Amino acid sequence: MALACDLHYASRKHAALGQPEAGGGILPGGPGPRTPPPHIGRERTLEAILTSSDYDADTAERYGWVTRSVADAELDDFVDGAATRLAPLGKVRWQPPRVGPTGRRSRPMPTRERPTSNS
């Protein structure tokens, strides 16, 4: 679920990221196997899926799986600060996914809503 977000922040003390399905004898489905490749690459995605390993926040940051790893005591303040800075930037309207030249759907790009004049 975390990989569906655009920004990923992880606690150095408590974060454990991975693909646990293979450890339970099932093939991973849903967005998990499809979402990591742009973030961590094919080889690391395969490693995560096939080994069912857990990755700490610092390793996940180094792999590009999370945007930033933060000390646990600072995480809430860091995320609150980021949200406070982003909130005034305006609403974002999402467009439906586009089909690229390869026929694959790409992630929708955000567009800024233009303010409407009340006059």
Image: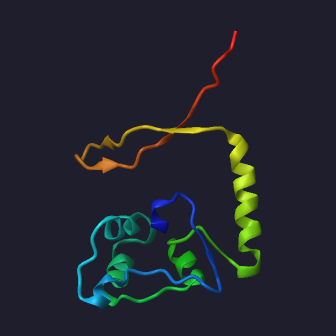
Is residue 62 found left or right of 75 in the rendered image?
left
Q: Quadrant of residue 48?
A: bottom left
> Quarter holding the N terminus?
bottom left
Q: Position of residue 101 (x, y in %)?
A: 26, 43
Residue at 32% in and 70% down? 33
Residue at 63% in and 20% down? 116
Q: Position of residue 96 (x, y in %)?
A: 37, 39
Q: Using the rendered image of the protein, determine whether residue 71 is visible from the camera's viewpoint.
A: no
Residue at 23% in and 83% down? 26
> What's the coloring here?
rainbow
Question: Which residue is outermost to the top?
Answer: 119
> 100 or 2, which lies in front?
2
Q: Using the rendered image of the protein, determine whether residue 27 is visible from the camera's viewpoint.
A: yes
> Quarter holding the C terminus?
top right
Is residue 76 found left or right of 62 in the rendered image?
right
Residue at 74% in and 67% down? 78
Q: Position of residue 28 (x, y in %)?
A: 28, 76
Q: Position of residue 36 (x, y in %)?
A: 40, 69
Is residue 100 found left or right of 65 in the rendered image?
left
Marks counted in the figure total 0
Q: Quadrant of residue 49?
A: bottom left
